Amino acid sequence: MKTQVILACDDKGKFLEYIPKEAGHTGDGRKHLGISVLVYNHKGQVLLQRRKHKVFDNIWDLTGATHPLHKKDGTDESLEEATLRCLKREYDIENIKLKNLGAFNYFAKIDNICENEHCFMMIGEYNGPVSLDTEVGYEYKWVYKEEFLIDIKKNPNKYSAWAKEGVYILTASGFFDKV
């Protein structure tokens, strides 16, 4: 298995250094850049995933989550490149226009594994077929925005820590006001 290199950062997302993915996710981790993406369709629905994860397993998440990677050619993936890579791998979704709504910091830990991220909230509209990679998720569902917002507030323990934090950015942007 190849070691992925991620980008360590401060609380404002300013790059500090390159670290192995494991260094960002063990113990208390090192703060690093992350991405949460929420795909929506013209019907006013959002695409959610029941995630397969080493530690944060069997919980509902936004459409996808990833990190911008440091590539072998010495460059770093942009937020858009990393998000498109995630959507292609997890759903076979391509050719989607993305928008960055901002970022948030969060920390979540179970045993010796953690998430310690400065996470960007990306969104994009997609109205085509979806094919979930069963290595990353158990299932997916399209849910109306209003239903999702009500459920994540009513049942927060069913959702990933980053999904709960992402809702604040989505709400502040007016995302849930637009159908």
Image (cartoon, rainbow, N blue to C red):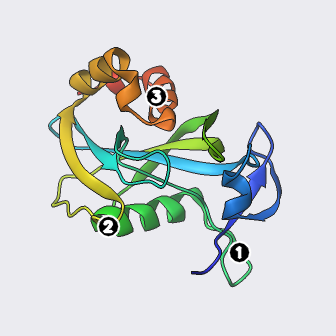
Upstream in sequence: badge 1 or badge 2? 1
Which residue is painted at 60% across and 42% down in the image? Answer: 119
Which residue is labeled 3 in the image?
Answer: 164
- Sequence order check: which comes first, mark 3 or mark 2? 2
Q: Amino acid at mark 1?
A: Thr
For mark 3, give the secondary structure. helix
**Residue 33 to residue 28: above or below:** below
Query: What's under tag 2, amino acid-wise?
Result: Glu
Q: Position of residue 73 (x, y in %)?
A: 69, 84
Mark nearer the viewer, 1 or 3: 3
Q: Are marks 1 and 2 in contact (CB under 8 Å)?
A: no
Q: Dot 2 corresponds to which residue?
A: 94
The residue drawn where x is 35% and y is 47% is 63
Residue bearing mark 1:
75
Verify CB contact (< 8 Å) between mark 3 and mark 2.
no
The Cα atoms of the two marked residues, 1 and 2, are separated by 22 Å
Sequence-wise, which precedes: disc 1 or disc 3?
Answer: 1
Q: Quadrant of residue 134?
A: bottom left
Residue 122 place in picture, x, y as percent: 47, 45
Relative side of 42 to 152, left or right: left
Pick the front one: 134 or 35: 134
Looking at the image, can residue 177 be seen?
A: no
Q: Quadrant of residue 96?
A: bottom left
Q: Residues within 10 Å of mark 2 (few under 14, many from 20)?
A: some
Residue lying furthest bottom: 73
Across and down, in percent, residue 81 comes to 52, 65
